[in-house]
Amino acid sequence: MLKQISHLIKSNRPSETVYAHCDGPCGVYDPSSIRVAAEAVVSMTKKILALEVPSAGDAKAMAAYQNTVARYVAIKEEQAHLAKTEMLVLWTDYFKPVHLEKYPDLHDTFWKATKLCSACKVEVSETHAAELMEAVEKIHNIFWSTKGRDVSWYTAS
């Protein structure tokens, strides 16, 4: 009987699916996902700026151009948002007061880096994309230093 009541409650009020990384003490953190997303932002920014606008009379070429721009912008937006999300998780879940003692500019570093993610979404700026990569490299270096490990910075592109 209890199973029937439980089933009835669950079927009438299903719970929402919840995703998180991580409010449990998993201890699995790595800034590499931030780097990959930031590199995609850089790549898409360069690709957008390199596109040549077709002549106004070529409707087919203009449609292809607009489609390509839309795709590149969508990827740039998605990856900038992903980089920001990954930064926020690292900032709020991994770093502790002891890290702030060693890196007093930690909060400012993350705050500025997340603002750069927003700037990369708002604009198509190689300058901001490059600044984002510099900020991600700084975060990478701080993070691995707190782990007592020397992990080389590299980029995939």
Image (tube, rainbow, N blue to C red):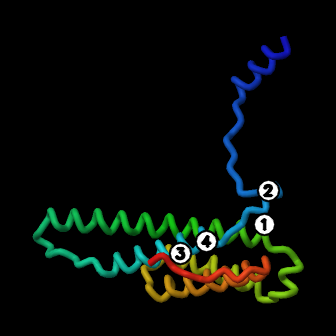
Check the image and name the residue furthest to the left. Answer: 57
> Crowdedness of circle 4 by 10 Å Cα count: few (<14), some, many (20+)?
some
Pick the front one: 17 or 22 = 22
Q: Looking at the image, is mark 1 or mark 4 earlier in the sequence?
A: 4
C-beta proximity under 8 Å, tags 2 and 4: no
Q: Quadrant of the C terminus?
A: bottom left
Tell me the residue that label 4 is attached to: 32
Percent x, y of residue 9 = 76, 23
Q: Is residue 4 above or below residue 153?
A: above
Mark 4 vs 3, N-terminal side: 4
**Residue drawn at (84%, 83%), measured in percent from left and top?**
100
Q: Which mark is residue 38?
A: 3
- Residue extending furthest toward the top: 1
Q: Residue at x 88, y 77 (%)?
A: 97
User: Is residue 71 positioned above or below 104 on the image?
Assistant: above
Upstream in the sequence, badge 2 or badge 4?
2
Q: Label 1, on which residue?
A: 93
